[in-house]
Image (cartoon, rainbow, N blue to C red):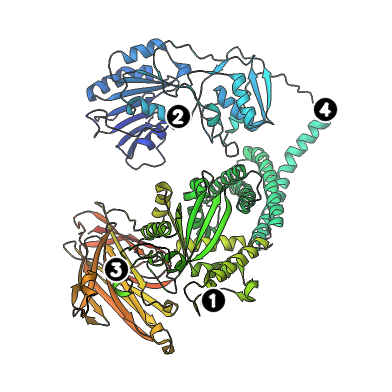
Amino acid sequence: MSHTALISTNNNQDHPILIVDRRGELGEALVEELKSQALVVYVSKNPPKDSENVIHIPFIKKTPSIPDNTYSHIFLIDEELEIAKDVAKVFIEKAQKDNSFLVLAIGASYADEKFLQDFTSPYEKTKIALLGDIFQKDKIYNSNSQINKFIIEAKVTGKIKIPGDGTNLAAPVYFDDAVSGILETVFGEEDQERVFYILPKTRITLLSLSHVFKKLDPELKIDFVKELKEEKKPPTLSLEGKYLLGDEYDLEKRIRKIEFENLKIEKAEEKRPAYKEEKNSRYGVKTVVFALLLFILLPLLTTIVFSFLGAGALLSLKDNISSGKLSSSRVYASFAHNSFRIAEISSQALVYEISPLGLKPSLSYLTKNISAGKDISEALLMLMDASDKVTMVLRGTSQDPVKDFSIAQAEIKNTLYIYEKNKQLGIIPKNIILKADELTQIVSSTIDFWPEIFGFKSTRNYLILLQNNMELRPGGGFIGSYAILTLDKGKINDFKIYDVYDADGQLKGHVEPPFPVRRYLPSTHWYLRDSNFNVDFSKGAVASAIFLNSEMQQVVDGVIGVDLSFIKNVLSVVGPVKINDYNQTVDADNFFQITQAHTTDKFFPGSTQKKDFLTAVYNSLQLKINDSQNLPYLDFAQMLTNSIDEKHILFAFNNTNEQAVFAVNGWSSSLVQDKTGISSFNDFVGINEANLGGNKVNYYISRSISQSTEIKNDGSVKESLTVAFKNSAPKDLEEKGVYKNYLRFILPQGTSLSQVQINGQNQKIIEAITDPTVYEKKGFVPPTGLEVQKEEQEGKTIYGFLVEIDKQQLVTIKIDYVLAQKIDTNQPSITYKLKVFKQPGVDSLPYDFSLNFPNNLRIVSADKDIKLSSQKAVLSTQIEQDKKISINLATK
């Protein structure tokens, strides 16, 4: 059952929704589902975790207090029918007055048929949701229900105890399905039913239920015990109603979701005997004396000794992982985990021992760190095991790649959970958090799509654009070569590198190129090599995929952009690589020069020297990584993370759900930004360069950006942006040293360009002549002034023009512009948000920013690296990836 979207079902849809649930678990889940679509008034003992668009009313008295308001829907959650009978009349009268839907959700085992009939009869918009025995994936929902008793027993003792002959019936239902069912009673299809059963239509015997657990864990033991006389039997209900879970409820699938490793069980639940059992309490005198001695002396010594052993093993583990010594790392991780586990057990005894002395709080720091040490060592063990499985899958050596990959995926998710939990507890050092957060963001955001991306659902083909950012283009660099990568169930089935000119030679017919390519490159036709000309990589990737299909009849599922800086980054971690076929060694310092010599010098159409050399580099690099016994995995993971964040690797997928995740996180270099709201003002700036000189002069180009923003008294926003280019190319390069740069400025939609200066000289701005029948006409003379092209794309206004930077020359370009939107200075507070959009293929560049604002505004807070004065905010930094700047202002 999927969660039902909130839809309008009556004329009160603009009113808030009331949810009353003293216990709170179901109620909070309903809050999460509904708060984005309506204001929610939530009556419960505890407030929700996220209070956005939620008003919490504490449930203090025996019966709840209903805030005086008009509600579109009222949900009363009372699973054990403790309060509903007392307040039913009040709630029904309130619903009648508001003309709202009233839903009562109760446990089917506590249902009173007469009460239910009385509840639904006075008002036609009352609904009853009868719930089965709810269970959750990561904690015990109700330890009195049989399904949860089984879960506790399976977790704690490894043995399920079935009362009686096992023929008693149960009606288990997964928590998410219960939530969806409650919502569906009023938000599903138009339904005249008044009673809804949110439990399996065919109940399951306890014996059959135990066999489901046994199937999932073959080592689980099953035993029969005497049934307690007071064991509650669910009532038989004759009320007509609709079963929302369908005829066939896949209970096994839901039970598989239980995360036994992460399952939280309260101590009272662990110790609660589910059934009466015979116990032998005869112990010898020696045993009693020894146990007493053990109780008094050993907990303290054991806790201290094994805590230090675990901490020492973790330090050794860190050093070994950093050195790439995985085999010894596993030994230390296992030793650390076992040490902390023993320390945790002994610390529990120690806490119990000193509690009467009032010293329990003094041990909280120690016990918290012991628990964290156990968690972290366990997480690292899982992570290393997952790494092994993924490596086997990618290399094609796994016997069952689907199973291994699925296990690895689950282990990585558990590792992420442990990391986040201990980060929130303040256990993990800040320097580790700074390094790990970006990696965990990438993994946690994408991990659910890994089976599709790695070809487990169907074979995946990817176009790899090998972009030379020494000849910078909008998408990252000139596409001199490309590769086709094929993944089938995680295995790299094929990877071949091709020369782009071989593909472009197959194009039939004419494809009109973008205006700058045709006029300034110049090129009459458009080809794959120039396809990444859009400032949004994901849009350019679509063009690249279309060209590949047109030229080579090859359909791909996605496009990945890789530039030379990424290969340099890999070499900086892996170290020098010997290219045996060429008897040369490449490293991070000489890679560009050697690659340039083999791919450009003496190159002619039809030559295979470029793809042959790049293939040799790839094969040699792959061989070194596979054969390396001490690969610095932490450094490699950090390098990969940085390369993605800095846009030296880019991703674009055909699947819209996959693409959305990568786009919103900036890993597709897409023009994505939040819309301006009432209390926030979103600004945007980006520069984009295209080397149209047919040379590799970007090797010598450096740049810096300075931006000045001024908020006027009337709320209008004026800005100046200055870009300084330095061309350090030697003079002997002649024409090959000139940077012919088609420069584009990406600004908020509707931005009006008021002035352009080049080296301090005002330029006469004229509209660019983009019609080829005009500028290609014989005798055409360009007009006097600066031809500026204006485009609109993805909610942005883009201005572009050609500028040339000669060898050993410094050129500054300054533009002045006014934003279309105004800041509402009458608002009590406003947040100014600026996104600085970094171009793929560009390395770090200096960036200065200043914000000036009128006297009626003041700064409340700002990002920590921003310096503040009375009416000004200043930032000086390096742009290595997309940068977000936030400054909170308020009226004086």
Q: Secondary structure at mark 3?
A: strand
Q: Measure how far apart labels 3 and 4 are at the Cα level.
A: 87 Å
Mark linked to residue 177: 2
Pointer 1 with pointer 4, Cβ within 8 A: no
**Three-letter amino acid code of the residue under disc 2:** Asp
Q: Residue extending furthest left?
A: 714
In the depicted structure, whether residue 499 falls above or below residue 735: above
Q: Quadrant of the C terminus?
A: bottom left
- Earlier in the chain: of badge 3 and badge 1, it is 1
Q: Earlier in the sequence, mark 4 or mark 2?
A: 2
Tag 2's secondary structure?
Answer: helix
Secondary structure found at label 4: loop
Residue 507 seen from this side: yes
Amino acid at dot 3: Phe
Q: Is residue 285 above or below residue 417?
A: above
Q: Are marks 4 and 2 in contact (CB under 8 Å)?
A: no
Q: Is residue 81 left or right of residue 102?
A: right
Which numbered marker is on residue 284?
A: 4
Instruction: Please tell me the numbered disc located at residue 598.
Output: 1
Packing grade of label 3 (10 A; few <14, some 14-19, many >=20) is some
Residue 891 location, quadrant: bottom left
Query: Which one is closest to the eye, mark 2 or mark 3?
Result: 3
> Which label sits on residue 745?
3
